[in-house]
Image: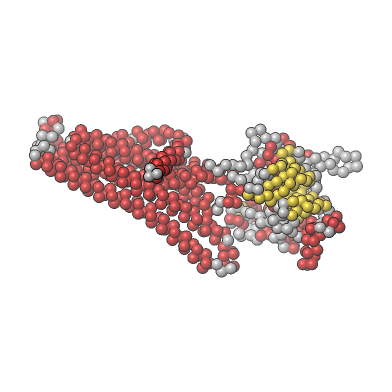
Amino acid sequence: MSTLPVVKKADTQNRQRNNDWRLFLRLLPYARHHRRMLALSMLLLIPIAVANAIQPLLIGQVISLIRQEPTTYRFLKNLPQLQGLGILQALLLLTVIIRLLLTGFQGYLVQKIGQNITAEIRQDLFHHVTSLAVRFFDRTPIGKLITRLTSDVEVLGDVFATGAIGIVSDLFSMVVILGFMFSTQWQMALLLLLILVPISGIIVYFQKQYRQANYKAREELSILNSQLQENIVGINIVQLFRREKFNSELFRTKNKQYVRQVDTTIFYDSAVSATLEWVGLVAIAGVLWIGGDLLLKQNLTFGVLSAFIFYAQRLFQPLQQFAEKFTVIQSGFTAIERVSNILDEPIEIRDRANPRFSIFDSQFGYIDEIVDNSENGNVSHKLGEIRFENVWFAYKENDYVIKDLDFIIHPGEKIALVGPTGAGKSTIIRLLCRLYEPTKGRILVDGVDIREVPQAELRRYMAVILQDGFLFAGDVKSNITLGDGYTIEEVQEAAEKTNVASFIEQLPQSYNTQLRERGTNISSGQKQLLAFARAAIRNPQILVLDEATASLDVGTEALVQQALEQLLQRRTAIIIAHRLSTIRNVDRIFVLKYGELIEQGSHEQLLQQEGLYSTLHNLQMLGT
């Protein structure tokens, strides 16, 4: 029974080593992109390490030459002393120049590699995050994602640049120095090596403690960023309800917890530096003790002793740098682990390998596919049919918010979704746009399962106008085109069709007017008008309105209603509205309750049924 904890600890350590190795391998594909620069930076380590190791020998030879000791090199003994000293000074200066130049160039290469790796990882992470399903963002605080994309990614480049390559450099330098030491005087070299072994164990222990503390510190930083982001986005509510002091106290508490964890990392980092500083002094004292004894017995010269004192300093200097860089690697492993958790997040909604998209050919207008082929001249709508076949959906396992929905919306038909809060109206829209996948059943558009259609084509085929129109930082034109290649003439035409042109032309630079983030320099109604123009320019076959006119004043709503009448012509439309008076003229009304379709029909038909719709309608009439 007593061996179980030991086995468990050993297993944990093995898993940790395997995990560290696995995390490091995640960076190798990025390093391969820069293998030439990486190889050059590694080759430069050889002359740098040799130049560094030769310098103590040259200084020792200077002392030996001055004292005419037997360890003086033979070719120096045959030269005048001043000439010999001149040669040694020139060689010493040459090694210094070589070391400074190559170290600077190698450092530049390493930093460049690190920054390139950082940029590539950040790009891949951003692309992956924006490809994840909405379900992921429902459960992940935005502040944590920002921390992953900024500070965590920034650390990753240092894993290769300052960390891995730096550690290889320091290890190689130590090996070269030890080689020169053993070739010069093996007894003192063995002493320094014996001191080196136990101190390495102490450093590894401190580094493990540092990594644990660093992981906790970064988690606290994520929470801190989440709180900051939440307060900035919700500043209106914070100030309206006078929560400044209360929220400030919450932030102060989290800030203290973060500082406490950072202090722990600083303690272990400082412990490594202090330990190495102390050991370096002990090593020099050991060299002086043994070297002094050998010197008195005339088994050692002053020149060799001086060289070993410099070697003792230079041997532990790379070790100290090694410890600092190992700390960087430990921080990097923490960051890799956190970033890998995001990169390993599966992309739930993917396009099929061979999707069917011929009926959604975006090169031609969708309305052009609607032709008049009937005898009485009525328009026959061929496109825009929506079919839900026994669709079930749950945000959480077995907690269904949509239950066995089965209905058909015919091409060109106008449908309204009504029901109490939580009935599933917005969820139906999200399923139709394929922001979520149905748990069971399937959804078809024009007879094609939407899972067979590329997402870009599906979402171009339909346009969704939400209650809160989101705007990006940029000009008015770019907020209408959203990166698609529409001309200014097409933008102006869409604005004219939706009665938005007059508002845009009143702006300071018209279509080139710069909008701030989230469009804070225009009104909510104006933002909504731009959302209508954004939908109109794409000429969608299916139009979804989710309380799209709720934020408009009476005058603006009248303009939009005129635009809507034109926009809705020959298009299939789904309208979500809480004001039942706005949906009287639709073809059919779907009444939802707890995710089930319990009633459907026209406004008059539903009133005659005296069901839920009739109850909701009467309550709204009483309210007015």
Question: Relative to 255, is 283 above or below?
Answer: above
The residue positioned 68% from the left and 39% from the top of the image is 451
Q: Residue 63: horizontal and vertical position, in percent?
A: 14, 40
Residue 488 shows up from this direction: no
Q: Please tell me whether residue 231 is drawn above or below residue 79 in the rendered image.
A: below
Q: How is the image coloured?
A: secondary structure
Q: Nearer the viewer, residue 327 or 231?
A: 327
What is the count of numbered marks?
0
Residue 281 drawn at (x, y percent):
22, 48
Does residue 127 appear left or right of residue 421 in this picture? left
Q: Nearer the viewer, residue 369 or 596?
A: 596
Residue that lies at the very extreme toward the right in this rendered image: 376
Quarter of the N terminus within the rendering: top left
Q: Is residue 47 left or right of residue 186?
A: right
Name the residue located 57 percent from the left edge and 63 percent from the top edge: 235
Residue 323 point in image, percent of width and height:
33, 45
Q: Quadrant of the C terminus?
A: bottom right
Residue under the image location 62 percent in, 39 percent down: 350
Q: Quadrant of residue 54?
A: top left
The image position of residue 519, as x and y in percent, is 61, 57
Residue that protrudes farthest toward the front in the picture: 1
Which residue is located at x 59 percent, y 64 percent? 236
* Frontmost residue, 121 versus 398: 398
- Does residue 561 appear anywhere in the picture? yes
